[in-house]
Image (cartoon, grey):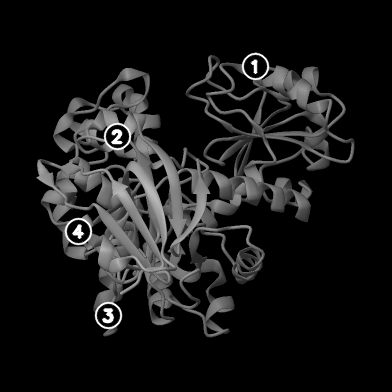
């Protein structure tokens, strides 16, 4: 066999004291044709074979971000970056707004995002009056990192129809100044009036954001993305088709469908698995707490939504941000299985950051895949340390307990809520070190091999795509990442590792 591409001069690494004799990889077409000893080089190399010298780099399967929001990430590229790396307090935010206002036209809103209230000095968002002092003549919208709270200046409030006499609408809470009773500019929830008033980004802005986001994904070695937005409609599906055709997104994309749009998809004959290896329809995202603005939806409603999506041919993905919704999702899943004779394959619990020991057997019995975000653990770890008892802390991101109970797990980022960088996430999972130098109990930490598997093969399994990708096995899609470094991998290696090459379909799509 003459290969189309050979990856040679690979690092000879070991995981957990086991050597992996991976010295040569051969690619034919867009699939892996060989992975093993360099002794096969002469048999695989033909006159037209291209040879890629990896210069002692480590070759891994491409990373699969099993829970993220790539379009929101692209849109955020048009927002002022107010993340902790850029701002330490409200004055930093105001200063950045003043500078941005100088290059923002009068027809546009000045938008900022990624404010981490827990990380800035004042532990709050700026008020309308503070924003007015910095930018009085442009509407300003600042979005907190979770997307559940925002700050607006007076002009933006007026554009949204929020005046002194306004009352809270559904799924919305308008904070008021305790002295004057006037709206402070802080709005929580999914405010429909803000969504209506905020002008959409132009096509050029969306395209520019996508191109920037695309390069970031590739630079991090991410070759597959799973868009898990509960608001995804058929229009989003069509938009992604256009974006892929135009080459604006290079990684493969699996898009979940939002439950509120179930009819749109099912009427068109679309269900989990529709599409191809570049763009595929994934699970049905059931997040009634977000889509309907009620933290605790009725159990009957959740049961019905899950059954309806299941009967329409969709894999189920439940939004599980806390213990209460974990219990409700377990009941809904049991209801589906007791009501329908159709196999409920690979259900997913998105997030599941806390799981008491008493619920571990039930989660295992449900056969649900927990899709977790270690970067969120890193970011919120100090908050957990401050808010929960030592006993409860054992339940936080209990990765080892999940493994011990046979519960499948996959890693992801929830980008743009947190960084989409896989290496810091894997380091957090293997060390339990979180922000500010703190460390959570080490009994739940994972091994290096487990962490790598959870960002590659496990993500493919969670999407029902493990027959196509996620490993370096012969026949798998040639989605690979070459990482700089040599020697035995340690948690410290994750902190220093750098992606130097990313390949998708056996084609080099990014080089450092």
Figure quadrant of residue 319:
bottom left
Kindly state the secondary structure of the residue where label 3 is placed: loop
Q: Secondary structure at mark 4?
A: helix
Crowd class of label 3 (few under 14; some 14 to 19; many from 20; radius 10 Å): few
* Measured Cα–Cα span from mark 3 to mark 4: 46 Å
Report whether 204 appears left or right of 14: right
C-alpha gap between disc 4 and disc 1:
58 Å
Up-down relation of residue 495 to residue 212 (above or below): above
Of residues 302 and 272, the one drawn nearer to the viewer in this rendering: 272
Q: Residues within 10 Å of mark 2 (few under 14, many from 20)?
A: many
Marks 1 and 3 sit apart, C-alpha to C-alpha, by: 54 Å
Residue drawn at (35%, 55%) of the image: 7
Name the residue that disc number 1 marks. 92
Q: Is residue 352 visible?
A: no
Q: Nearer the viewer, residue 416 or 451?
A: 451
The residue at the point 56 percent across, 63 percent down is: 232
N-terminal of the pair, mark 1 or mark 3, is: 1
Q: Earlier in the sequence, mark 2 or mark 4?
A: 4
CB atoms of marks 2 and 4 within 8 Å: no
Residue shown at 46% from the left, 71% from the top: 277
Residue hosting label 4? 39
Q: Name the side, left or right, on which 76 lies relative to 221.
A: right
* Precedes in sequence: disc 4 or disc 1: 4
């Amino acid at each position: 066999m003459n290969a189309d591409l050979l990856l040679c001069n690979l690092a000879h690494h070991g995981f957990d004291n086991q050597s992996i004799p991976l010295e040569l990889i051969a690619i034919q077409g867009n699939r892996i044709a060989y992975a093993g000893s360099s002794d096969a080089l002469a048999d695989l190399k033909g006159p037209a074979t291209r040879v890629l010298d990896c210069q002692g780099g480590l070759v891994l399967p491409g990373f699969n971000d099993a829970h993220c929001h790539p379009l929101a990430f692209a849109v955020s590229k048009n927002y002022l970056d107010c993340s902790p790396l850029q701002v330490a307090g409200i004055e930093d935010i105001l200063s950045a707004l003043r500078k941005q206002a100088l290059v923002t036209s009068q027809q546009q809103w000045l938008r900022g995002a990624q404010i981490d209230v827990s990380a800035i000095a004042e532990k709050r968002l700026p008020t309308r009056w503070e924003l007015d002092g910095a930018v009085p003549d442009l509407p300003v919208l600042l979005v907190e990192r979770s997307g559940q709270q925002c700050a607006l200046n007076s002009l933006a409030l007026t554009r949204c129809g929020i005046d002194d006499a306004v009352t809270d609408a559904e799924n919305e809470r308008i904070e008021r100044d305790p002295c004057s009773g006037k709206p402070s500019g802080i709005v929580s929830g999914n405010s429909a009036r803000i969504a209506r008033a905020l002008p959409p980004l132009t096509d050029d802005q969306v395209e520019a954001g996508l191109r920037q986001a695309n390069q970031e994904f590739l630079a991090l070695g991410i070759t597959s993305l799973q868009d898990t937005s509960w608001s995804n409609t058929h229009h989003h599906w069509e938009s992604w088709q256009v974006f892929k055709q135009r080459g604006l997104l290079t990684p493969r994309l699996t898009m979940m469908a939002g439950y509120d749009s179930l009819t749109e998809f099912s009427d068109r004959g679309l269900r989990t698995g529709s599409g191809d290896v570049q763009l595929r329809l994934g699970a049905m995202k059931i997040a009634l707490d977000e889509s309907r603005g009620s933290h605790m939806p009725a159990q009957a409603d959740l049961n019905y939504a899950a059954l309806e999506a299941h009967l329409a041919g969709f894999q189920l993905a439940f939004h599980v941000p806390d213990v209460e919704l974990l219990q409700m999702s377990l009941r809904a899943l049991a209801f589906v299985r007791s009501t329908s004779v159709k196999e409920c394959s690979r259900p997913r619990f998105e997030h599941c950051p806390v799981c008491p020991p008493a619920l571990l057997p039930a989660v295992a019995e449900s056969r649900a895949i927990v899709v977790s975000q270690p970067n969120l653990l890193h970011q919120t770890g100090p908050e957990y340390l401050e808010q929960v008892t030592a006993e409860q802390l054992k339940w936080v991101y209990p990765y080892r307990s999940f493994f011990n109970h046979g519960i499948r797990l996959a890693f992801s980022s929830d980008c743009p809520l947190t960084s989409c960088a896989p290496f810091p996430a894997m380091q957090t999972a293997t060390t339990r070190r979180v922000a500010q130098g703190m460390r959570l109990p080490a009994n739940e930490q994972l091994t290096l091999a487990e962490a790598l598997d959870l960002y590659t093969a496990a993500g493919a399994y969670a999407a029902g795509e493990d027959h196509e990708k996620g490993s370096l096995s012969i026949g798998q899609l040639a989605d690979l990442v070459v990482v700089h470094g040599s020697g035995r991998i340690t948690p410290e290696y994750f902190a220093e590792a750098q992606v130097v090459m990313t390949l998708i379909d056996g084609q080099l799509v990014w080089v450092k």
